[in-house]
Image (cartoon, helix red, strand yellow):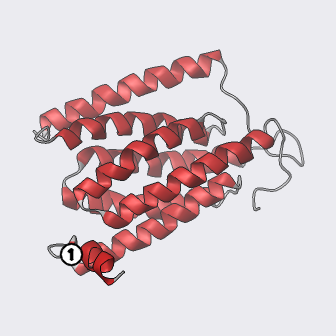
Amino acid sequence: MSQIFDWVFAQYQDTPTFIAILEMIGVVFGILSVWYAKRENILVFPTGIISTGIFVYILWVFGLLGDMLINAYYFSMSIIGWYFWTRKVDADHFIPITRTNRQEKKWSALLFVAALVFVFLVYSLFDKFNSWTAYVDTLTTAIFFVGMWLMAKKKLENWTYWIIGDIITVPLYLYKGLIFTSLQYLLFTIIAIYGYMAWKKNLNKSPLTLLK
């Protein structure tokens, strides 16, 4: 067990202590955010804002532009989602979980392609295509862009995008040396699977409360 801890913390030998602490704080709030999302709890958004705000800074320090951009996008979409989730369909009920319609599926595909092109252009502009991880970053960024947009709109299919993106991201962050973040995405994958099942049970049901 001690060898495992030695290996984990060895990855942070050249990392400033405050960055490692910030990463752990960001991970905790990130896990809370996904947990609250699974429960259809409005606290998904304030916890997500804290986590993504921290990671925007950390990823800027590490020069991981694709990941930084997606966290900045999460930050913005969390504010939009916070507003959208608190809208009511009547005096007592909030908007329900629904499936994507044909038009929303088209917009999802368009957003995916647009995100791919945008991140590719950013990486090219800053000459960041110096590793295979940059190409994977562009893919996961596009996947998560769609997932976050669908979550803000309270669509069941958002979980499908999270699951696919999380599975890809776990080994990616492990390779980058961000061990705690990799473990976070492993936990995200598990929670996302349960989140999909929980949201499917509540499909088309308008909740009376958003604090569950």
69 sits left or right of 192 in the view: left
| Identity, as a three-letter code, of the amino acid under mark 1 | Ala
Residue 92, image x and y in percent? 89, 49
The residue lying toward the viewer, choosing from 88 and 28, is: 28
Number of numbered labels in the structure image:
1
Measured from the top left, where is residue 83 in percent x and y?
A: 64, 48
The picture quadrant where one finds residue 18 is bottom left
Residue 69 visible at all = yes
Expressed as whole percent of the image width and height from the top left, the position of residue 108 reads 51, 25
Q: Is residue 179 left or right of residue 90?
A: left
Residue 69: which quarter of the image? Answer: top left
Q: Is residue 91 above or below residue 17?
A: above
Q: Residue at x 69, y 46 (%)?
A: 85
Q: Residue furthest bottom?
A: 2
**Rendering coords of residue 44 (x, y %):** 61, 57
Q: Residue at x 38, y 23 (%)?
A: 113
